[in-house]
Image (tube, grey):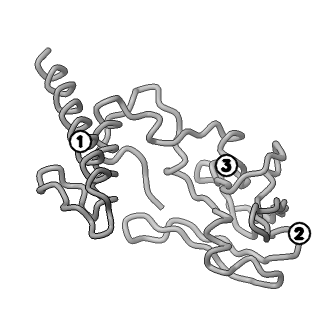
C-alpha cells in the first residue's frame, strides 16, 4: 500500500506519512462487500511484491474485531485483539454510511492506521499526507499529472497532451489543458531558478 518519498523532495523535518503505514479503510471494506456480520477474513499488505503485513478480522453487527501480532523494535511478538466499533450516519438519498470510531479519540473516521501497537486514526498518530510535505514545484507537477490522467493520459510529462475525451465539452477541455500547461510551466520555472542558484 505504498511507501513515502518516491520521486518527491521532502522537508528534512517531515512527519511520518499515512501512505507509509498499514491501514484499514472502511470504504474499501464496504465496496468489496465485507461488512456483513459473521464475515471472517484476512487483510494483507505488500511492499515490492513481498507481503509486509497480515491481520485476521471478524465482523459483528456493531464492530470489527482485529486479531494480529505486534512487536516493538524487533522484540518479542505479542498477540493483539482489538475491537473497532462502528457508527452510522444517514445519507441524503436513503441508506446510511458506516464509519469507524477511533478507539483513542472517539472521532468518526473512514481509515485507521497501524503506526503503533493499535489501529488508530491519523490524528492520534500525528500522521500527515505525503502531498502535504511536497514543495511547490512537486505540488504543481502533481496537479498537471492529475489532469492528464483525468483526460485519459499518463504521468509522463514528455508525452503529448491527451486529446479531448469524446463526451467532454471543448470549453472544459481547453480550461483543463490551460490549467495543466500553466502548472507544469510554473513548476519547471521554479525548479530552473532553484538549480540556477548552484
- Nearest the viewer among 68 and 12 is 12
Asked if residue 73 lies left or right of residue 183, the reply is: right
The reply, left or right, for residue 16 in relation to residue 37 is left
Among the 4 quarters of the image, the one containing residue 60: bottom right
Instruction: Indicate which disc residue 44 carries.
Output: none
Q: Earlier in the sequence, mark 3 or mark 2?
A: 2
Q: Residue at x 71, y 68 (%)?
A: 68
Q: Residues within 10 Å of mark 3 (few under 14, many from 20)?
A: few
Q: Secondary structure at mark 2?
A: loop
Task: Label 3: state its secondary structure.
Answer: loop
Q: Residues within 10 Å of mark 1 (few under 14, many from 20)?
A: few
Q: Quadrant of residue 188?
A: top left
Q: Which residue is mark 2?
A: 62
Q: Is residue 195 above or below residue 187?
A: above
* 3D distance between C-alphas at marks 3 and 1: 44 Å
- As helix, strand or loop, the secondary structure at mark 1 comes to helix
Quadrant of the snapshot with the C terminus: top left
| Nearest to N terminus: mark 3 or mark 1 | 3
At a point 32% along the width and 40% down the height, the residue shown is 8
Picture coordinates of residue 105 (x, y %)? 82, 42
Q: With 82 as the anchor, is 18 left or right in this view? A: left
Q: Are marks 3 and 1 in contact (CB under 8 Å)?
A: no
Q: Nearer the viewer, residue 40 or 25?
A: 25
State the residue lying farthest toward the top: 197
Task: Tell us which disc is closer to us: 3 or 1.
Answer: 1
* Label number found at residue 116: 3
Counting from the top left corner in percent of width and height, residue 124 is at 72, 40
Q: CA distance from mark 1 to mark 2?
A: 49 Å
Mark 3 and mark 2: Cα distance apart in space? 24 Å
Which of the two discs, 3 and 2, sits closer to the camera? 2
Amino acid at each position: 500500500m505504498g511507501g513515502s518519498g518516491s520521486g518527491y523532495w521532502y522537508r528534512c523535518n517531515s512527519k511520518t506519512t499515512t501512505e507509509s503505514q498499514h491501514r484499514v479503510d472502511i470504504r474499501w471494506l464496504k465496496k468489496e462487500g465485507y461488512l456483513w456480520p459473521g464475515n471472517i477474513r484476512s487483510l494483507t499488505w505488500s511492499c515490492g511484491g513481498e507481503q509486509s503485513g497480515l491481520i485476521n478480522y471478524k465482523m459483528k453487527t456493531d464492530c470489527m474485531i482485529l486479531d494480529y501480532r505486534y512487536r516493538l523494535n524487533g522484540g518479542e511478538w505479542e498477540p493483539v485483539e482489538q475491537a473497532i466499533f462502528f457508527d452510522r450516519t444517514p445519507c441524503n438519498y436513503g441508506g446510511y454510511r458506516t464509519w469507524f470510531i477511533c478507539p483513542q479519540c472517539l472521532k468518526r473516521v473512514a481509515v485507521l492506521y497501524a503506526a503503533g501497537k493499535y489501529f488508530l486514526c491519523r490524528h492520534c498518530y500525528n500522521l500527515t499526507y505525503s502531498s502535504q510535505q511536497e514543495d511547490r514545484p512537486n505540488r504543481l507537477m502533481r496537479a498537471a499529472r492529475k489532469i492528464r490522467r483525468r483526460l485519459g493520459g499518463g504521468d509522463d510529462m514528455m508525452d503529448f497532451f491527451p486529446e479531448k475525451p469524446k463526451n467532454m465539452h471543448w470549453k472544459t477541455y481547453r480550461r483543463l489543458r490551460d490549467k495543466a500547461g500553466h502548472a507544469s510551466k510554473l513548476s519547471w520555472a521554479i525548479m530552473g531558478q532553484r538549480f540556477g542558484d548552484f
